Amino acid sequence: MSTRTLTKQAATGSLIGLALGDALGFPTEFNDVPSILATCGPWREMDLPRPAFVTDDTQMTLALARGIRTATDRGALGPSRLVPPVREEFVAWYHSPDNNRAPGRTCLTACELLDGDLPWQRASRIGSKGCGANMRVAPVGLVPFLSDEQRSGAAQLQAALTHGHPTALAASDLTARAVYLLARGGEPMGLIGQLRSYAYENRSRYRHQWLGDLWTFSHDPSPEDFARRGWDECLAALERVQDALRAPSPETDPCLATGDGWVAEEALATGLLCFLLFPEEPVTAIRRAACTRGDSDSLACLTGAFAGAHLGAGAWPKEWAERVEYRSDLLSLGALWDA
């Protein structure tokens, strides 16, 4: 790892970037590109709203991050150590008066069911692969000193607490992997190839220790079939990103190439595409993601997490970073993991 990688404050950069993307995409969600341009002007000049409010994407990222911090304070990260504090944080988010930012139905239903003594697998929405699982997973890629198995298991388990579909699990695993690789100095040019290799390696791996009997709530004949279904959808999505990058078209809505992002594999793909169109221009990347016909806040928050992990805390305009909502929480968690 280079000295630059050690000093760039990747965790701070990624968390702030995620929140900035979320705030930029909040007002444009549910609008098509012509409407966004009519309201905001040229997409390359979009300004951060005043005040810079975020959505449930950042709120749930912080909930997950606090849960992970509590779990790792108690010892080595494993499923029995991770579930109680993250479950507690998700339920607290569910009851919070600030949970008024158009949260997804899957998260609301699952968190209501988590507020009780049901095994978490029974609360999980096994049919949902909404992007709520991977929009919040960046902290898993930023926590230092995790093994590959811990990182993968934690990424999938946090997803499964609400979104039990195998594609939600695989997309969350890949999102955390991308954040981890970029934070450690991985080159954007080789990122899709590395993620595809990782997906092939894990294609038939069901993480029994972390997921327990989750797969039995699906229609799949075996845990391996359950896992493969998710990884195969993500591999197809990564292929679409590769195809789009062969003839880049920055002025075209990225959703046309990789999907609108309401579901997990499309959110991963379009977030990656927006980042990889502008790997050294983080503000342009999140502006592109926010000016899309799709789930613009989640797309821009994923794009910001990738860009910030790659370029660090210095990637973002000081004036923007200073006024984004939840700034102090984001900075304290970033400083913890950058240290």
Image: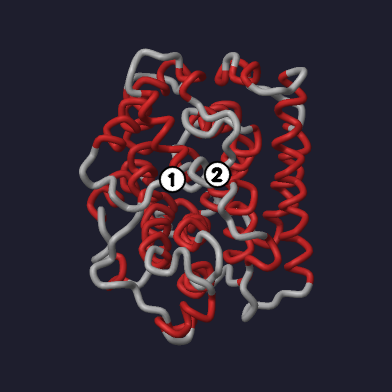
Q: Which residue is mark 2?
A: 130
Labels 1 and 2 touching (C-beta < 8 A)? yes
Q: Which residue is mark 1?
A: 104
Which sits in the foreground, 97 or 326?
97
Q: Say which residue appears at 25% left-offset and 53% top-offset.
A: 326
Residue 106 picture location, percent across and down:
47, 38
* Left or right side of 150 for 19: left
The disc label shown at residue 319, or none: none
Q: Say which residue appears at 59% left-offset and 40% top-offset.
A: 129
Q: Amino acid at mark 1?
A: Gly
Q: In the picture, residue 220 is in which quadrant? A: top right
Observer able to see residue 310: no
At numbered mark 2, what does the secondary structure look like: helix, strand or loop?
Answer: loop
* Left or right side of 200 for 148: left
Observer able to see residue 337: yes
* Left or right side of 262 for 8: left
Q: Badge 1, how many Cα within 10 Å: few under 14, some, many 20+?
A: few
Residue 322 picture location, percent across and down:
25, 65
Q: Which numbered disc flags the more N-terminal residue, 1 or 2? A: 1
Q: Amino acid at mark 2?
A: Gly
Residue 256 picture location, percent across and down:
68, 68
At numbered mark 1, what does the secondary structure look like: helix, strand or loop?
Answer: loop
Residue 171 picture location, percent across and down:
62, 42
Label 1, label 2: how many angstroms apart (C-alpha)?
Answer: 8 Å
